[in-house]
Amino acid sequence: MKRLLILSLLLLVGSITLLPLMIGKWRGVGIQDSDQPEIFQKSPPPPDPRLAQGSPVNARPDAKVVGNSSCVICHEEITKRYQGHAMANTLAPANLADPNEKKAGKNATFQSNGMTFSIRREGDKLWHSEALDRDGKCLASEEERVSVGIGSGKRGKSYLIEVDGRFSQSPISWYGTKGIWDLSPGFGSDRHFSRVVNPQCLYCHAGESKTLDSFNPKFEPLTERSRGVGCERCHGPAGDHVDYWFNHLGPPPSEAGKPDPTIVNPKRLEPGPRNSVCNQCHLQGAMRVERRGRHQREFRPGLELEDFWTVFIKHPAVADKFKAVGQVEQMESSQCHQKSAGTMGCSTCHDPHGEPEPERRDSFYRQKCAQCHTVADKVGKAPECSAPKADREAKADACAKCHMPKNGASDIVHVALTDHNLLKRPSNAVENKTRPLKPEENPLVRYKETNRVSKLDQERDLGIAMVRQAQNQPANIGKILDERSVPLLKRAVEAWPDDPATLLELGQSLRNSNPEESIFYLKRLNRLHPEHEECLYNLASSYFYSGNGKEAEKIARDLVALTPKTGGPYDLLSAILLDLKDWPALEKTTRDWLKFQPVILVARQRLVESLYRQNKREEARVEFDIVLEQDPANRQDLLLWYHRLSR
């Protein structure tokens, strides 16, 4: 069974122009020249929502961002109050530890999965390490300097390592609610320091982050404006606003008493665009797909999120809304939201500029409930609660403690820790029953139906979502998702033959079932965007599955050269070399891989085989002993595998 590691990269769709396109007479990275040129008309760009009639003045593409320092001059009180909000502290240099972190000690260690994890502070530098220690001897270890902390630390904080503009996540996280160091969410025994951070992660955690191109997770240096979510994330670029009020430049504000058109105030927006301000980061769904021709960074407050993203959720038949569901989805399914005719949103209950002090928290949110739950003839007086007085007093008369209990499902951000279903009696809630999907039903559905998107665009987005979802499913489910996506994506690529996301996902969906056809679409994408890393990865994989190992090797080497400190391409190249039985090349590749990721088990196991096949038996046994120590749960299977190498 040929095993490939799928890169954790996020595709960002590039902009398109109306020009004839001829490809095939020049060579992309790793691609042979075609005998016949492929000629087609470039797709017309979709309308830009930022330029639509009625869009806010500061939504236009050239609107200037100025940063929080310009806001504080006139809005000092509210800006300072916001600095204590978790959103203002979503990203910071890793050396800025919060007080609770410091209490945990300058240096700390913990054990997990047979490995020793260590946190070490040295002046203003923070180091994380992972080591395989046995009997006082270090068999393998990796230590990385951490550059960025993600999260305010109130619930928890994760950490990023930056190498040549690329970020990976540390396997070590700080859990503020527990006051402990532990493995990062979603990290098992095989993740180590290898999880690639994609642009969507930094879009929501950094005030400002820019990739060097539209397709690859390589970033420009973070700046002071990257630290936390800034004012302009919710109010839009403030360049015009500042120019007018400071310098009296640009269009004047509207008449006195009316909204200032140079800036967006979310509370003045209609429910759709108002909620979009929050939902740009807090509505995760099961899968988010960028609209054709759009980038996530193009979204502007005052516009509808669905003009930039299509959000998919699990089909109601297979989703349990009471387990690990996003807070937005829970809140919008509640009776409170539905009976408000959609006017209830995040800011109905949450102050976007600050958080109540702990001693005021219960009364603050009780007053929010009382805004709606009042008796008409008793102005301002909340109705009597049906719970016994003793129960209410035991919970400080806090509505949320009964109606929004902590579910304790996970430490992962974006998973509901506080139940936002807003049930009258959560303890009596009947768990919704799931059922098998009918043949005509898709496991993903749009979060909200819309008439703002053409049927063909909707099919494109669903096809892309299904291919991406297939990567996280068992093989049989993934195969079904891939098969269902193909006709949708083929119709889309006929309409838009140069749409990068469609070409990529169509190529990926065909990789196993029809690698030759997969190569056709991926080669087109490669010629359009020669350094598109995920395209190169899938193209090499498709050649591999087609039986053309030499071409697969050539493309995989090009990819390694583009990303010399990323593990995924080494995993791909070493799998190809293993299949080709090129033992010297496999030895070199795995040794190069282990130089920067020395605790990756599959790399060492492939090194063992390369050494054994070259009759370097003593070296092979030394490395194999490390494999046994690193994976004791599979000791018998590993011993059997090693014995079979001699056959």
Image (tube, rainbow, N blue to C red):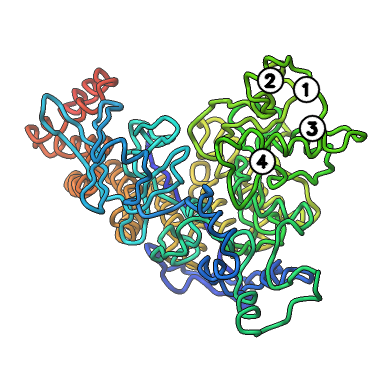
**Label 2: few (<14), some or many (≥20) within 10 Å?**
some
Residue at position x 33%, y 58% from top? 563
| Callout 2: SS | helix
Q: Determine the CA span between mark 2 and mark 3.
A: 22 Å
The x, y position of residue 346, in whole percent, is 68, 45
Q: Determine the CA span between mark 1 and mark 2.
A: 8 Å
Residue closest to the eye, 237 or 646: 237
The residue where tag 3 is placed is: 335
Mark nearer the viewer, 2 or 3:
2
**Label 1: few (<14), some or many (≥20) within 10 Å?**
few
The residue where tag 2 is placed is: 392
- Position of residue 423 in the picture relative to residue 185 (left or right): right
Residue at position x 77%, y 46% from top? 449
- Kind of residue at disc 2: Arg
Of the 4 image quadrants, the one containing the C terminus is: top left
The x, y position of residue 241, in whole percent, is 64, 74
Q: Looking at the image, can residue 492 be seen?
A: yes
The residue where tag 1 is placed is: 385
Q: Earlier in the sequence, mark 2 or mark 3?
A: 3
The residue where tag 4 is placed is: 328
Extreme-left residue of the structure: 618
- Kind of residue at disc 4: Val
The x, y position of residue 357, in whole percent, is 56, 41
Instruction: For the residues labelled 3 and 1, say whether their Cβ atoms are less than 8 Å apart.
Output: no
Q: Earlier in the sequence, mark 1 or mark 2?
A: 1
Of the 4 image quadrants, the one containing the N terminus is: top left
Asked which quadrant contains residue 362, the reply is top right
Q: Earlier in the sequence, mark 2 or mark 4?
A: 4
Instruction: For the residues labelled 4 and 3, say whether their Cβ atoms are less than 8 Å apart.
Output: no
